[in-house]
Image (spheres, rainbow, N blue to C red):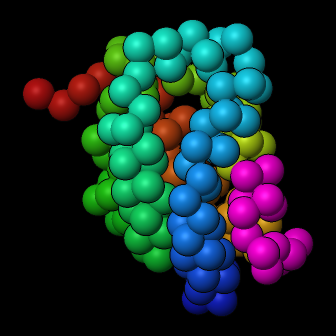
C-alpha cells in the first residue's frame, strides 16, 4: 500500500482516538446495525473489547504496510478467533462492521474527506480480506 494512504489513515486514526467517545460511538452504531450483531455481542466485556479493537486498528495499519507478510504476522490470532470454529464471524458482518466504522470516523474526524474515507477502506480491507480468506481454516495445533 502506498505510504500516502498509510499516513492519511494513521493521522485520521490519531484524530479519532483523541475523541474519548470514538469507540463507544462505533459500538453503538455497530450494535444497532443488525440483530445478529447484537446477538454476537450479548456477553461481551466492552472494556476489554474496546481495548482489543484499539489494538486491532493499529495492527491493521502494520499489516497494511506489508500486505504479503503483515496480515499473518499481525492478524493470525484475530483470524483464528473470528473463524467458523470459534466466533463464526462471516463476511456479511464485516460489511456492517466497516459501514459502522466509516460512519463513526465521519463523525469523529474533524478533517474527514473522501481521501480519508478511502484510506480507512483500503487499510481495513487488508484485514477484512485476510479474515474472510481464513474463515474456514482449522486452528493450528
Q: Nearer the viewer, residue 125 or 21?
A: 21
Q: Is residue 105 left or right of residue 106?
A: left
Confirm whether the magenta stretch covers residue 140: no
Q: Residue at x 49, y 40 (%)?
A: 131
**Residue at the limit of the structure toward the right, as seen here:** 114
Magenta stretch bounds: 102-115
Q: Is residue 25 left or right of residue 111?
A: left
**Residue at the limit of the structure toward the bottom, as seen here:** 4
Q: Nearer the viewer, residue 8 or 29?
A: 29
- The correct choice, above or below, for 141 with respect to 40 in the image is below
- The correct choice, above or below, for 113 with respect to 73 in the image is below
Figure label count: 0
Q: Please say whether residue 63 is visible from this viewpoint.
A: no
Displayed quadrant of residue 76 = top left
* Residue 101 x %, y %: 69, 49
Q: Which image quadrant: the C terminus? A: top left
Q: Residue at x 41, y 70 (%)?
A: 62
- The correct choice, above or below, for 136 with respect to 103 in the image is above
**Residue at the limit of the structure toward the front, as seen here:** 20
Q: Which image quadrant: the N terminus? A: bottom right
Displayed quadrant of residue 72 = bottom left
Q: Is residue 141 left or right of residue 116?
A: left
* Residue 106 x %, y %: 80, 61
* Residue 13 x %, y %: 58, 70
Q: Residue at x 74, y 25 (%)?
A: 32
Magenta residues, dominant SS class: helix
Q: Please say whether residue 70 is visible from this viewpoint.
A: yes
Amino acid at each position: 500500500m502506498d505510504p500516502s494512504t498509510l499516513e492519511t489513515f494513521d493521522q485520521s486514526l490519531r484524530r479519532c482516538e483523541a475523541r474519548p467517545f470514538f469507540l463507544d460511538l462505533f459500538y453503538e452504531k455497530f450494535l444497532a446495525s443488525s440483530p445478529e450483531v447484537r446477538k454476537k455481542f450479548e456477553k461481551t466485556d466492552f472494556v476489554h473489547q474496546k481495548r482489543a479493537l484499539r489494538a486491532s486498528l493499529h495492527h491493521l495499519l502494520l499489516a497494511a504496510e506489508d500486505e504479503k507478510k503483515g496480515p499473518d504476522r499481525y492478524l493470525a490470532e484475530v483470524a483464528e478467533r473470528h473463524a467458523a470454529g470459534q466466533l463464526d464471524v462471516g463476511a456479511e458482518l464485516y460489511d456492517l462492521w466497516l459501514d459502522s466504522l466509516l460512519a463513526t470516523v465521519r463523525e469523529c474526524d474533524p478533517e474527514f474527506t473522501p481521501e480519508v474515507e478511502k484510506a480507512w477502506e483500503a487499510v481495513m480491507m487488508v484485514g477484512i480480506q485476510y479474515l474472510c480468506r481464513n474463515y474456514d481454516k482449522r486452528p493450528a495445533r
